Every structure is written in structure tokens, then in C-alpha cells.
Image (cartoon, rainbow, N blue to C red):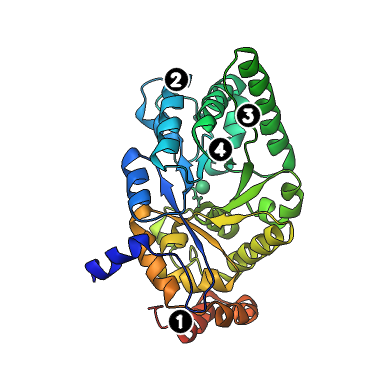
Amino acid sequence: EGRRLATLANAPTRTRDGIDVRLLGNAESVADVALARSRGADGVGLYRTEFLFLRHKGLPSEDEQFIAYRDLVLGMGGLPVTIRTLDLGADKADAAGLALRGEDNPALGVRGVRLSLRYPAVFTTQIRAILRAACYGPLRVLVPMVTQPDELIAVRTLFKLARADLKRENVDLPEKLPLGAMIEVPAAALNVRALLDHADFLAIGTNDLAQYVLAADRGNDALENIYNPLQPALLRLIAYVIASGRRAGKPVSLCGEIGGDTRFTALLLALGLAEFSMHPGQLLHVRDRIAALDHAALRHRAPSLLRAHTHEDVETLLTHLDPGFA
Ligand code: PEP
Ligand code: MG
């Protein structure tokens, strides 16, 4: 079985009926990047930069960040990489003490882009490091925890200012740098068309989107019957975001845990997903699963999946639809 899977490392990702799917790796370390590449990922769909900050005593300097981002880009050998700007707050508190303390509801507090925009100098250091690294290969920037368009507009402004400064310093700059929004707040999903006016691409973060849609802590085991990826309300939002991105002609990936879980591969193809980002250890399993699935037949079942009333109903439908769902 392991040997059969290993032969898939250099194979294209294609459904049984010949539809190509993009598989990207989630990465937080050099080892993840190497694994993503060796498993034939089409790129990195989510590089979680907070891990640089969590491991560090103080704040990582511009040069330290630049080296990490440049090595990421070089490590993927010309394949596109997606760097997510700092996503601290909520469950992720940093050693440098940027994340606010004493919030009553940290998950609903100053986290992700909200925190970055609160500290423009810290954010600009990261932005400068990203811009410098972008000369070494194709790079995109992903903004976490976006709620409304003004956040993307503010991030774009900071990139523009940093660009002007770097240009004055005679630093090489990339011609363009796509900016994307993570969709993990219900308001962002419901109003995604407004975000698409300002975003070049989208990445659905289902770990947080599920938490906020269901008002259920993603880490609370007592809520397992509620925090379920098959919840109809969540599936309808995911389908709407994918369809809206497609209509706007902008790529949509999904980088939550379900993207790398083969039990949900058929479901996500049915909802129209064409780009999956996952822990690199899952790449071969998902590629294998996709090869066994019929895209046209799955797409045909999307309406019935989206009409389901309970996660149990979705589960029953999937059991009939997908022999691999167990
Ligand atoms: C998510 O929320 O789905 C996501 C990919 O981001 P993280 O797990 O880092 O919050
Ligand atoms: Mg998240």
C-alpha cells in the first residue's frame, strides 16, 4: 500500500473522468516544505508565519523573516507559495506579547489581521520581508481573519508604502504580488462578493469558519456533535464562496483540516472545489482518492447535498455517493 502510494508522488492529480485538481501543501517548517515538494504538491497553499513568532524570544527581525520566506520560495523550486500574514491571537499567543491579554473572548477579539493592523510597524516589518522574498519566485500573500473590505484595503496600502520605501532603498521588487483573503468569518463568507472586489484569490479556512458558524470552540471535545464539518450551514457557505470566486474568475482554495481528510474529498469536489491545501503528509492519500472519483457525477449531486437538513443526512448521502466514505 505504501509503495503503491509512493508511485503517486510524480503523478498528476486527476479525477477518474479526467478533471485536473490542484493539491497544495500547508507548511510551518522547512521539513513541511521539503515534504510538500517530495510528494508532488503544486505549491504551498498556506505558510503559517506565526510559527516564526511563536518560536522566537522577541520579535523576528526583517532579515530573519526574509531568510525564512526566501528559503520557503527557493525550497519549492519555482512552484507558487502562499505566505499568510501573522495570525496571532485567540489560541495563539506569542512570546513577544503582541497578542492582547485579558480579552473576555479572545477568539472574537483582536486576532489575525485585526492584530496586525493594530501594530503597523510590526506588520510593515513582515511586509518588507515578504516583498524582498518575492523576487526569488512566485509568491502570494494571504490575509487571515478578514471580516470586511476595509481590512484588505488597509493591507494593500501598507504594501504600497513598503514598496515605495524599498524602491527608494534600491531593493529589487516583484512586479506584482497577489493578495488574498482567508474566508473564516461568517460575515466574510456571506459578503464574499465585496471582498472579491479587493482580493486576487481566496482561501477558505474551515477550521475557524466552522467554529464561528456553529459558535463551537474548535478545540472543545465536548462539542463534537456540533463542531462537525458536515453541518449543512457550513457546506452552504463553502459552496457559495467557491461559486462566487469562480464567477469572479479568481482562484479559491480550501486549507482547513478537511482539505486533507479523504473522508471529505468527494464532498468538496461535489461543492466545486478545484484547489485543496493540506498537511503535506496527506497529499498522496488525497491524490489517490481523487483518482477514484467521478467529478461530473459528484457535481451532479451538489444540489441534494446542499438541501440536506442535518449533518446526519449529509453523512447518509455521502455514504451512498462515495464508497470511500466510512
Ligand atoms: C483555518 O482556520 O481553517 C486555517 C487553515 O487556519 P488555522 O488552522 O491556522 O487557524
Ligand atoms: Mg484560521
- Quadrant of the rendering where the N terminus is positioned: bottom left
Q: Position of residue 302 (x, y in %)?
A: 61, 77
Q: Which residue is mark 4?
A: 112
Disc number for residue 313: none
Q: How many neighbours does mark 4 have within 10 angstroms: few (below 14), some (14-19), or many (20 or more)? A: many
Q: How many neighbours does mark 2 have within 10 angstroms: few (below 14), some (14-19), or many (20 or more)? A: some
Q: Which residue is mark 1?
A: 322
Disc number for residue 63: 2
Q: Are marks 2 and 3 in contact (CB under 8 Å)?
A: no
Q: Secondary structure at mark 2?
A: helix
Residue 61 seen from this side: no
Q: Position of residue 190 (x, y in %)?
A: 71, 57
In three-dimensional space, the C-alpha distance between marks 2 and 3, rounded to whole angstroms, equals 21 Å
In the image, 278 versus 303, the foreground residue is 278
Q: How many neighbours does mark 3 have within 10 angstroms: few (below 14), some (14-19), or many (20 or more)? A: some
> Which badge, 2 or 3, is on the more N-terminal residue?
2
Q: Position of residue 312 (x, y in %)?
A: 50, 78
Q: Looking at the picture, which amino acid does disc 3 mark?
A: Leu
Q: Are marks 4 and 3 in contact (CB under 8 Å)?
A: no
Q: Quadrant of residue 287?
A: bottom left
In the image, 254 versus 30, the foreground residue is 30
> Which badge, 1 or 2, is on the more N-terminal residue?
2
> Which badge, 1 or 3, is on the more N-terminal residue?
3
In the picture shown, does residue 70 fall above or below 244? Answer: above
Q: How many neighbours does mark 1 have within 10 angstroms: few (below 14), some (14-19), or many (20 or more)? A: some
Residue most toward the bottom? 320
Q: Secondary structure at mark 4?
A: loop
Ligand 2 neighbours mark 4 (CB distance < 8 Å): yes
Q: Which residue is mark 3?
A: 117
> Which badge, 4 or 1, is on the more N-terminal residue?
4
Q: Secondary structure at mark 3?
A: helix
In three-dimensional space, the C-alpha distance between marks 1 and 2, rounded to whole angstroms, equals 48 Å
